[in-house]
Image (cartoon, rainbow, N blue to C red):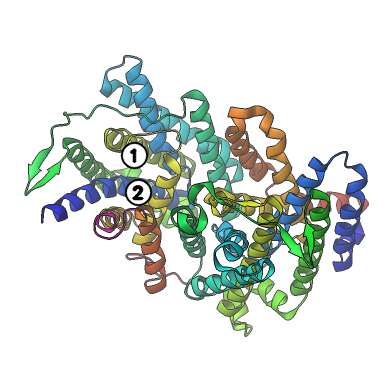
Amino acid sequence: MADFLQFAFSGLTVGAIYALVALGFTIIYNASDVVNFAQGEFVMIGGMVTVFAYAAGLPLPVAALLAVIVAVFVGLALEWLAIEPARDAPPVTLIIITIGASIFLRGLAQVVFDKQFHSLPAFSGDEPIRIGGAALLPQSFWVLGSAIVIFLALYAFFNHTLTGKAVLATAANRFAARLVGINTTFVMALSFAVSAAIGAIAGVLVTPITLTSYDVGTLLALKGFASAMLGGMGNPIGAVIGGLLVGLLEAFGAGYINSEYKDAIAFLVILGVLFVMPQGLFGRSHTERV
Amino acid sequence: MAFLKGKYGVLLAIAIIVLILPVAFPSNYYFRIATLVWISALAVIGLNLLMGYAGQVSLGHAGFFGMGAYAVAVGPTHLGIPPVASALLGAASAGLLAFVVGRPILKLRGHYLAVATLGMGILVAMVLNNEAQWTGGPDGMPVSRLVLFGFKVKGPVMWYWITAGFLFVGAWLALNLVDSPLGRALRALHDSETAARVGGIDVARHKLIVFVISAVYAAVAGSLLAFFDGLVTPNTAGFLHSIQLVTMVVLGGMGSILGSLVGAAVLVTLPQALTVFHDYEHLMLGLMMMLFMIFLRRGIVPTLRDRIAGRVQ
């Protein structure tokens, strides 16, 4: 039972991070049909900038805020300089562009920062909290709590603000949205900014637990993508559930079966789900218009 | 340039390039690079059949490439299978895996094949990384020299001709395929799957056939690389390699066999030139990928062809 709780909690913690990355994928995908493989680099930027700003003497909250601002600027630059000029390109081309952007950002981080692993002090100490025989890090609560706050904030934003509804309208039908006077260019920029901010916050939150380095983004992006697909691409709630599921399966798989193949579990699951439930868990099937 | 349009024009162009280059090569180093280009081009031609004609993207093709490469490393070393038989076995298993993964997935549209192949490629790379007693783990393992009829195949010059031969045959087969009923069916379903289905084309089956063919191309290229390098590492099956292959296809021109060669040539030689930048290598590679896709999104060969055709008129 203690083992079970331990695995469940670490699974939920990591899963919350995957869910945030998957949510970033979903927001950009809905606004622009772009699968942004540079999503993981926002997490890396969040972690790395905070680490170096903190080491330079800034207080932790200020360093974290700075990291989020940097990530938002990178997200906007990505949209303006790389996505917008290739707006009408086929999906493959856009995928290569975002992967190129992710390799570029990784290379940039390697030059600006370094190739070492870095950590941050946990927000409220390292003293584990014991529940039912399992030892839980206080930072896990920070991760889970912040993730919940972000989910609720996004939910409120999309359902109860005019700007949020404009984003949803653009996702549903860009042309129709433009006809009713929605500035879809602004919506796209906004979606990149929000995704970047979410990714960066995830990076700040998770660094005290899993460390960070210039190359953490790739695997996170791939797992976040798998999570988003698992939940059904384009469905925000599906993305969150997909992320949590992948995190839990990884933790239980590593704990009970084989820790060497921990990273494989996300991809085995996604293959399995695609075989059985082709549209993902919560996706809707599409009909092609001729 | 009109001769580049026909099937035999493309083959002639490849033959001329292959025959003329050695005259200009000052050292073995150039033969080595050219060999690497031929090998990549072979894999890219296969992938181009899938992407350019069937309109499907595979983000895990390096997985098949890696299977071919490790087949000729593991087969002779651990299982006592002769090298050439190992290569055939590698190609067969890559084709089989493509069949098994592709069958349920290719019925779907959109990004699903991309995700499924992505997952499959990463799983292959993970197995190669983790099963160290078979594969040597992250360090990789050596491949014994290929001996054919008591004759040792070695040296970049000899491999230049062998791999060029494979490239030529690969291009010839691909061109014939494109020109066959299968090729026409693929082009039809690329334009509109529904329309193709209405026209009586079994969409899923045709996609599956070309997916398996492209996997076999990649595996054969992988085996050649392993023989040539005398060493295999899990990176050959890695995500970055898959992306390089996809970029080569798009950069050269989707649906252009000659473009596959051009795309491979640019992306294989470029990193050689970039090594002078040391720490900036990744940065430059990422930047180039973005710039190529933004400014040359239709691919080098189709863009050039249109330019030249436009000037003639």
Q: Is residue A244 above or below residue A196?
A: below
Same chain letter for marks 1 and 2: yes
Kindly identify the residue that appears in the image at 67 percent across and 63 percent down: B52
Left or right of A166? Residue B143 is right
Q: Is residue A191 above or below residue A74?
A: below
Is residue B279 covered in magenta? no
Q: Depth check: B244 or B187 in front?
A: B244
Q: Which residues are magenta?
A: A252-259
Kindly identify the residue that appears in the image at 81 percent across and 53 percent down: B160
In the rendered image, which residue does mark 2 sit on? A23
- Magenta span: predominant SS is helix
Q: Depth check: B207 or A119 in front?
A: A119
In the rendered image, which residue does mark 1 sit on? A198
Is residue A257 covered in magenta? yes
Q: Residues within 10 Å of mark 2 (few under 14, many from 20)?
A: many
Q: Quadrant of the C terminus of chain B?
A: bottom right
- Residue A290: x and y, percent? 57, 72
User: For residue A83, which quarter of the picture?
Assistant: top right
Disc 2 element: helix
- Cβ atoms at labels 1 and 2 below 8 Å apart: yes
Q: Is residue A174 visible?
A: yes
Q: Which residue is most to the left?
A: A132
